[in-house]
Amino acid sequence: MTERADFLQGTLDLLILRSLLLKPLHGWGISKRIRQLSADVLQVNQGSLYPALYRLEDRGLIKSAWGESDEGRKVRIYSLTAAGKKQCALEQADWRRFAQAIEQVLQGT
Amino acid sequence: MLSRIVHRLRHLLQRRASERAMDDEMRFHVEMEAAELERAGLDRDAAMRQARIAFGGLERFKEEGRDARGTRWLQDLSHDVTYALRQARATPGFSAATVLTLTLAIGATTMMSTSHRYLMSQGRSVAGAEQLVYIGQGARDCISCRSLAVANFLAVREQAKSFERIALFEEWEPILRGPDRAELTDGVLTTPGLFETLRIRPLLGRTLIASDTLAGANPVIVISETMWRVRFGVDADMLGRTLFLDRKPYEVVGVIADRDVYPLDTELWAPLQLRDLPLTDRMADAYLALARLRQGRTADQARAEIGMIGSQLASAFPEQMRDLRFTLTPLLDFNRPSSNVEGWIFTGAVALVLLIGCINLAGLLIARLSGRRRELAIRRALGAGPGRLVRQLVVEVTVLTLIAGVLGALLAIWGIQTLVRWPGIRVDTQSFGLALSIGAACGLVISVWPAWRLTRPTLVGELRETTRTATGGTDAARGRRILVIAEVAFSIVLLSAAGLFTRSLSQLRAIEPGFDTTRLLTMRLAVPQGSTARNSDIQELVASIEAIPGVQRAGVGLQVPYGVGSARREFAIEGRTMPDQRPRARMNAASPRYFEAMGIPVLRGRAFSVADRVGTQRVALINQSAAEQFFAGRDPVGSRVVIDSVSWEIVGLVGTVFNGDPEEVKPVEIYRSTQQWPRLALWIAVRTLGEPTAVVAPVRDAVRRFDADLAITRMLTMDALRETSTEAERRMLRIMTSFAIGAILISAIGLYGLISYSVAQRRREFGVRLALGAQRRTVLRHVLAQGLRLAVIGNVVGVALAIAVLRVMQFMIFGISTTDPLTLIVVVTLVSGIAVLAALIPAQRAMRVDPMTSLRAD
């Protein structure tokens, strides 16, 4: 459990950026979207999403603004910045290369 | 980057809002999750629980979230400081002990550093001081001889290429005639080059120039700003005024600013007339030669060059120069207290206090941290990172260090003013900064490593272990015991040093002076240079002093006890051959009623009388020590001594007087009559009927009426003069005693802390023992024994250490050995007593443990 979480930690940033690519979302929305996109395979402690969000905001990859949820509650809505979009593309490419390499290794054996 | 800073700052400034937003956001998340689960069919409570589990530890993520924003350190800092202050109030014992320890350590270090810098600063203010060197001459083994003969100075000035400038000067103490009294001043006679060598520009007028030394030049003088201010009230028409120095007129041509004054405390500079000096005598090294190295030349190069010149001179003048060589010493080295053992002992004492302080601090912190293991473990479990906890501890120590810093500064100021008392010494900020850094560094290093260690271990184990421990038999406890033993041992060393100084001083004071020191006023009479000593004049002065009401007797002597001490010279005893060694004695001189005035007993024969005058039989007196040494039992009266080929008849034997020099408790002394051997500079001794200070003004008036150009210096009662002779010893004693008190105080705190802590840890055990029927007195004895055991080991180690280390003090103490048993016994008793006291309070606490309460606790 912990090992998987550690592994996911590194990729969490990418997942957040990816899920914000379509439209701005609030925290829970991002969490839900990640689960949807991965068909519930990737299960993280949902709370760990938030430190990751603040870190990304601190790095200037996403920005946040007050908005309203579908239920009309005041919430923080996160969206990608230009730098965030670029970073997303970069990390996506990196990840693909990495996944390919692993795939090759696995097929080779 | 900028946006990032702005982002961080916004969060920092709106900390509360940002904190609330984070909380809202996370709650919202959990609620949404729960709502969704509820829609999926779970009941409300189950959905909420499930959502919380899925979210994970709320507080942990908040912590991480704050971290992610990078603003945390500042928020945390203010938390930590508040928390530290709260902690400090919650554990007043620990805080007080820590602050006290650090205060003593910082105070002592500041004092030490200030004194050191004070000693080093002399000459430091001179412009480009590192380029200045003294050239001297001396025997082969002389390392830093400072004085030079004029002939050699001229040779060096002519031949050496290493120096930009070179100047020759000598000390000069002329008497300045004043409106109401004449005063001795501190001056130098110098070649005009001194000012260029030192790169001094005058504050007013000019400095000395070459033409001032020409034959027939108008005598001129340069004065210091202090003299201008103190003696002439900043007279605007100072330049051109005439001063009478040693009866001769000098025209003031310049004023030197105080910051430029060199040598220190000089008030007057007058031209040195080289042509009047012994220009061929290469051994008359009575002068100082100061030179400035040429740009780019090093002291070693210059030393080599003057060495060459020296060997050339040695072959040219083998008679005079055979055993001489030239030396070169940088000006700044003269004031370096490296050879100063007193300074080293001082430094050693401070280092020991600092060491004891650090050891104590380590002990205190270890104890406190082990007491707080549980708290730290709980805080970790609640989500605080290890770095965060270490920082918390660091902040706590820093807060305490800062408080101690303020107190330490006050302590240092007090210490410098009351213990050291060097003129003009002040606590400087750099010294204080150094001490504060050392104190803080000690505290931090010592607090961080155990903190780091204690924040590491697995949480569960830690929580379980510390919940219920009966005894504290851990590594930390053993470490602390060793620390306390070390503290006690080092305190013994310091206390022994202080004890030895105390004993030495009382031994010194116990020496019989050999004369009556009460109701006695003495003063040195300074006579202008070029005066001739005429006995009839002095007799007239003595008579006028004796005429003052309240004066019983007056006399003059060449030297009085506790003064400077008379010179030692060789002499011969007539009719006796001394093959291997000629006898030596201190040569003093006295007027007829000197012995009566001083209260020195005449043991045999007679004292001098007014009938002993030039033309009659030359007479001398010897003291008891001389009689014992040279006449072993026989009556010396009637024998004759030969001094400088002149024969003197011994007419009496007088008591030996102590000169204040511990090296020579019973000096061998010969007195000649001042009437037959007139001297210039004399001491006047006045025996009074009542309080000696009452006749100070009338005596001054009598001297002034006698001659307006005679100056009186060092006018003191004999009791005061006697005190000044032990000033250095008393300073050393004051300093050492206060350090020793500091050390024993710190050690007592350490011991008390250790025992208290172990008693607190073992409350339960004591409760069980008492419940099982142990006597309360047994518990008390048990705890006391625990403290005493440490004290005894510390005592043994300390005494061994003191015997080994304090040997270096042997030459500084008088009348006892450094292993003086009495001192060691007193010190050991004192330390043991303090140890018992320190252990007694916690021991009593242990005795009063209520079995029921202690067993129910936890």
Image (tube, rainbow, N blue to C red):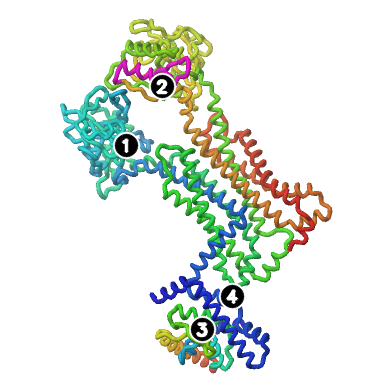
Q: Which mark is residue B263?
A: 1
Q: Is residue B703 magenta?
A: yes
Q: Residue B39: x, y in percent?
A: 63, 92
| Amino acid type, callout 3 | Val
Q: Which residues are magenta?
A: B683-709
Q: According to the image, label 4 marks what residue?
A: B59
In the image, are marks 1 and 4 on the same chain? yes
In the image, are marks 2 and 4 on the same chain? yes
| Amino acid type, callout 2 | Ser
Label located before the other in sequence (1 or 4) = 4
Disc 1, disc 3: CB below 8 Å? no
Q: Chain of mark 1?
A: B
Q: Chain of mark 3?
A: A
Number of the front mark, 3 or 4: 3
The quadrant in which the C terminus of chain A is found is bottom right
Q: According to the image, label 2 marks what residue?
A: B566
Q: Which mark is residue A75?
A: 3
| Amino acid type, callout 4 | Glu
Number of the front mark, 1 or 2: 1
Q: Residue B565: x, y in percent?
A: 42, 23
Q: Residue B637: x, y in percent?
A: 47, 8
In the image, are marks 3 and 2 on the same chain? no
Residue B808 can be seen in this image: yes
Number of the front mark, 3 or 2: 3
Number of the front mark, 1 or 4: 4
Report the side of B748 relative to B637 (left or right).
Answer: right
| Amino acid type, callout 1 | Pro
Determine the residue positioned at 28% across, 35% down: B224
